[in-house]
Image: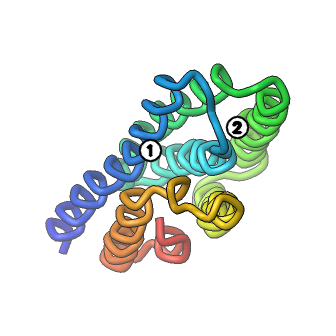
Amino acid sequence: MEDLSFIIGLIGNVISVLVFLSPASTFWRIVKNGSTEEFDSLPYICTLLGSSLWTYYGVVKPGEILVATVNGFGVLVEAIYVALFIFYANKKMKKKTGILVGILNVGFPAAAILGTRIALEGEAQIDSIGFVCAGLNIIMYGSPLAAMGTVVKTKSVEYMPFFLSFFLFLNGGIWAFYAFLVSDLFLGVSIH
């Protein structure tokens, strides 16, 4: 069973990498046009938050190196996306995005990591960060709703990338199966 879970985890890593890279064409467009246009930064900020905390979870939980490595890659990619977004956004959007990054990508992860490191040990530490990650992932999967608002407003699916939706669907399925194989409730609840 351990070999099967490792293989499924590797497949999950490949699909997760595709999820992280699927907005690359959007950011190529932003760089090429020199503008963030009608794109919203919230999905990228939320993904960076989730990836940061899942990296921490994968590091503190024994045997979850696959979760840590792929989310570490996600932190790098999402940080690049957020930096590009801030660089090319208009003044009002830069301010909004900067505030959100400060709160959600610096303040919240720091508080969660420090809080669990200082106050808890062993399984309690792992369980508490897993609980936070699972809850945030459930919320994070709602962040595409911000893009849906733009889709409705513009009457165009241009701002809801197909490949992102497709790879998120595959990602949820493969990580749910992995969670079942390794009996990790937190990965399963969040459909990482």
Q: Amino acid at mark 2?
A: Asn
Q: What is the secondary structure assignment of the residue under circle 2?
A: helix
| 29 left or right, relative to 144 | left
**Circle 2 residue:** 105
Instruction: Please report the residue visible at 53 percent of the width from the left and 32 percent of the height from the top.
Output: 81
Spot occupied by residue 188 in the image (x, y as percentages of width and height): 47, 75
Instruction: Please report the residue visible at 55 percent of the width from the left and 53 percent of the height from the top.
Output: 159
**Circle 1 residue:** 23
Instruction: Please report the residue visible at 77 percent of the width from the left and 27 percent of the height from the top.
Output: 94
Q: Which mark is residue 191?
A: none
Task: Tell me the distance, in whole angstroms, between the alpha carbons under discs 1 and 2.
Answer: 19 Å
Near mark 2 (Cα within 10 A), the count class, few <14, some 14-19 or many ≥20, is many
Spot occupied by residue 113 in the image (x, y as percentages of width and height): 69, 42
Q: Are marks 1 and 2 in contact (CB under 8 Å)?
A: no
Q: What is the secondary structure assignment of the residue under circle 1?
A: loop
Spot occupied by residue 170 in the image (x, y as percentages of width and height): 33, 69
Q: Amino acid at mark 1?
A: Pro
Near mark 1 (Cα within 10 A), the count class, few <14, some 14-19 or many ≥20, is many
